Image: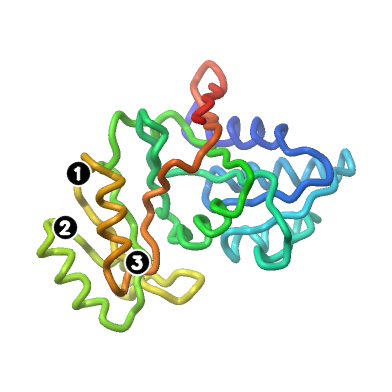
Amino acid sequence: MNQDELKQLVGETAAKYVENNTVVGLGTGSTVKYLVDALGRRVADEGLSIVGVPTSDRTADQARALGITIKDVDDVDHIDLTIDGADQIDKNFQGIKGGGAAHLWEKIVAINSDKNMWIVDESKMADELGSFPLPLEVIPYGSTQLLKRLEAKGYHPEFRMKDGQHVLTDSKNYVIDLHMGHIDHPHELAKDLDSMTGIVEHGLFLDLVNTVIVGHEDGPEILEAR
């Protein structure tokens, strides 16, 4: 199985966990796309009734096109389960997200959810975090000064660019990626980043996930994190 087939495997497996008449947080990214496709089929074939709370405009557009009812996070009174991808997960089930520049909305939905499930192919599992760059969503105003402060701390920051332009989040902010190589103390790093003016949100998702579904050649592996 190639990587896309592993992503499809875990996306379709996760869709089976979604119960009728629930509010479901819908993540963002290539793996979640398969999840949303599978949920759309369940809506069409089984009459599954759910409300989706999207973490990006592109997920919202995909879900609506498949007949899934979509509501904003501020228009629901609870979220039963959020299913999202992850860019890296360590052995303690701490994660890095934000490769798709949606980590601010993803974290807002995640912290307002009763349960969180991450779906990944096996390449996303690691002993420690940091080999995947850590994304920050930052305010454009003063962002070059912020980059200098991050450099002084030894965090190896880079603006995320595409075609010579800053990548913009759905909230019209910039993204800075920290190329740290390894993160020895993710909770301490999170606290430091939380204290820095200009950073709206970082991509460390700590002590959040309940279940991880990992795609392997021989089938999906279900890991209960907490």
Residue tagged 3: 175
- For disc 1, the marked residue is 181
Lower sequence index among marks 2 and 1: 2
Q: Is residue 219 above or below residue 59?
A: above
Q: Secondary structure at mark 3?
A: strand
Q: From the viewer's side, name the closer residue of 59 and 127.
A: 127
Q: Is residue 22 above or below residue 156?
A: above
State the mark number for residue 156. Answer: 2
Image marks 2 and 1: residues in contact by CB distance under 8 Å: yes
Q: Quadrant of residue 163?
A: bottom left
For the residue labelled by badge 2, is the local secondary structure a helix, a strand or a loop?
Answer: loop
User: Along the polypeptide, which appears first: circle 3 or circle 2?
Assistant: 2
Q: Position of residue 98 (x, y in %)?
A: 41, 55
Figure check: 3 above or below 21: above
Residue 95 rendering spot, x and y as whole percentages: 40, 42
Task: For label 3, count other residues whose C-alpha is less than 10 Å away and answer few (under 14), some (14-19) or many (20+).
Answer: many
Callout 3–callout 2 Cβ contact below 8 Å: no
Q: Is residue 93 shown left or right of residue 210?
A: left
Q: Earlier in the sequence, mark 1 or mark 3?
A: 3
Point 67% across, 63% down: residue: 61
